Amino acid sequence: MSISIHHLVRTETEQLLTGMLNVLDHAEGLVKDGKAGEADLMASKLAPDMFPLSLQVWRAADHGRAAARLAGRETPPFTDMGELGIADARARIEETMTLVKSVTEDELEGAEDRTVEIVARGEPTRFRGEDYLLRFAIPQIAFHVTTAYAIVRNAGAELGKRHYLCDAFDYTLS
């Protein structure tokens, strides 16, 4: 059985970015309930040397554009990753999801063997398409969504694994 790159990038990216939207919904709930200030929450980190919640969103959105990169579309990196409010963070994720959904199966035909070049650690870095998706992009999105989840959970949100897994249980076999 083979699984297409289109299927992999769409399902994985959409599920993970939907998880990020769930995290942001819970962040907004903390703010509305007066349990956290929005600016303070978006600036929160798990450790001093880690990115704050705002940058976790930026990074998830950037890596979430993997489908467009695999399709050969021009996707300049985000260079001005400033602080975001919750509404702007949600918009960034929704824009990324719209981009992902716009990539067609035809555009991704043969993408597993295309070369994808990104800037990583300040250096141009080249991957074979399949390796870029499976060894870099998806793990990066998952890392930043999980870290955002942990920041918001640590701030007091009643956030559970079901918010991360989203609709995974809709696909169980009976």
Image: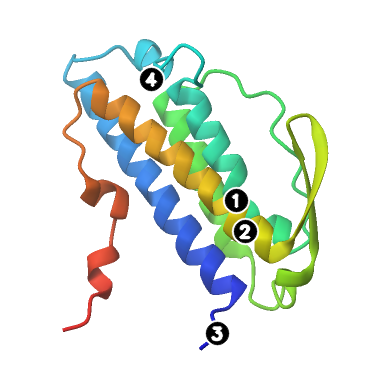
The number of numbered badges drawn on the structure is 4
Q: Earlier in the sequence, mark 2 or mark 4?
A: 4
User: Which three-letter amino acid code belongs to the residue tagged 4?
Assistant: Leu
Determine whether the residue tagged by mark 2 lies in a helix, strand or loop.
helix
User: Which three-letter amino acid code belongs to the residue tagged 3?
Assistant: Ser
Q: Which residue is mark 2?
A: 133
Task: Quadrant for the C terminus, please.
Answer: bottom left
User: Which three-letter amino acid code belongs to the residue tagged 2?
Assistant: Leu
Q: Where residue 118 sits in the image (x, y, percent)?
A: 77, 44
> What is the C-alpha distance between the residues marked 4 and 3?
39 Å
> What is the C-alpha distance between the residues marked 1 and 4?
22 Å
Q: Which residue is mark 1?
A: 137
Identify the colour scheme used. rainbow
- Which numbered circle lies on residue 2? 3
Q: Along the horizontal axis of the image, is 147 left or right of 36?
A: right
> What is the C-alpha distance between the residues marked 2 and 4?
27 Å
Q: Which residue is mark 4?
A: 46
Residue 112 falls in image quadrant: bottom right
